[in-house]
Each structure stands twice: as C-alpha cells, then as structure tokens.
Amino acid sequence: MRHNKKGRKLGTDWSHTKAMKRSLVAALFLNDRIKTVEARAKEIRPDVDKVITWAKRGDLHSRRLAIAYLNDKELVREIFEKVAQGMWQDRPGGYTRIMKLGPRKGDNAPMVIMELVTEPCVPKAERKAAEAKKAAPKKAAPKKVAKKAEKAEEAKAEKSEELAEDLGFENDGTVEQIEAVDAAEKSEAVEEAREEAEKAEAEAAKEAETVDAEKIEEEKADIK
C-alpha cells in the first residue's frame, strides 16, 4: 500500500524521482523551456510555482529555501533578480505553459514542451473592456457611411434640379429632361477636366521655367 505517497510514480523510486524533478525544474529556469514527458511536466508544475512564490517573497528565508531545493546559488540569484525587476508581479499563478507534441517513437510516450510564461498578465475585465471599445466604432461606422451616401444623393438631386431649371425643363421626371440633364452633367465634367488639365500644364511650364533659370544661374556662377 502506498500510504502518504501522493503524486505520480514516474517509473522510479522516491530518491530518483526527487532528483529528476529537481533537475527538470533547474533546467526549466535555465533555458525557459524544456522538452519532456507529459507526466513529468505536470508533476514539476507545483515545484516551479513554489520557487517563484519564494522569489516573490524575496526575504532571506525564502532565498535559503530556494537554494536548498535547487542546490544552485547562481540560478537562485538570477530568479530572484528577475522577480525583483518586475517579472510575474502582476500574475497570481499559472507561471508555466504546456504544449503537446504527440507520442514519442519507440515507447509511444506523450511528449510536451513546457515553458515559462513571461508575458504580462491582463485581467479579464480589462480585456473585455478593450474588446468592447474596439467593437463600438465598427458598429457605428455603417451609420456614418449611410449618412454620407444620403447627403451625396441629396446634393446630386439638387444639382440635377438646378440644371433642369437652367435648361428650361420642369422637374417632372420626363425622359427628355433626364437625357438633357445627363448631357449637361457630362459637359460640365468635361469642362472641369479640361480646366484641371490646363492648370496642370501651366504649373508644369512654370516649374520648367524656374528649373531653366536656376540652371542658367548655376552656369553663370561656374563661369565666374
């Protein structure tokens, strides 16, 4: 009977299991991630959380407990320094992440990658508030687009009415009136395009003249 022997067996005796767990925890803190069997990764999770909790306390007793467990003063110093600089301060737990890789060839053991979670922790309420803020403009956008479209249609209708009055038609929607208004709008668009083209040509000519004048002045300066 396994009285007072909680936890997984892991296929070894007690002393071997203890040493193996300690070496895995040390390797995780040294490299930030390790590849191991799923049962071993789940077994060392409480030990990793315990070491980080000691580092968060930061007192001498906690440091001695961490050194006694990991048996590496330099590694403990690095962990305590990282925590003192702000790592894991806003995270109340869940310092590790396990990603499954699938079965191992040979014995078909489930393999995983276990890594330390170093990104900052965002509370659930803050995440929901940020998502709501992002979603609010998206819902309001279609209304703005609809209002702009309505204004554009109203302006177009007013312009067509003015053209119809200028051409001598009454605003009754006859085919002749519509054709005449369309022709007038096209002629106006053509005239506007011509005016813009003439303005562009005039600006280009002015720029060419200024460039030629600058070149002449530079040549004169070189001759002098």
Image: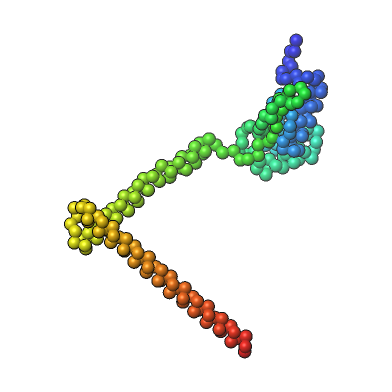
* Residue depicted at 20% across the width and 52% down the height: 174
Return the residue nearer the eye: 18 or 162: 162
Residue located 55% across and 84% down the image: 216
- Left or right of 70 in this view: 164: left
Residue 206 seen in this snapshot: yes
- Decide if residue 66 is in sight here: no
Q: Nearer the viewer, residue 67 or 218?
A: 218
User: Quarter of the image containing the C terminus?
Assistant: bottom right
* Residue 148 screen position, x and y as percent: 35, 51
Is 90 drawn above or below residue 201 in the view shown? above
Q: Position of residue 150 (x, y in %)?
A: 31, 50
Q: Position of residue 121 (x, y in %)?
A: 59, 38
Colour pattern of the rendering: rainbow
Position of residue 177 in the picture relative to residue 54 (left or right): left
> Where does residue 1 sit, x and y in percent of width and height?
75, 10
Q: Quadrant of residue 161?
A: bottom left
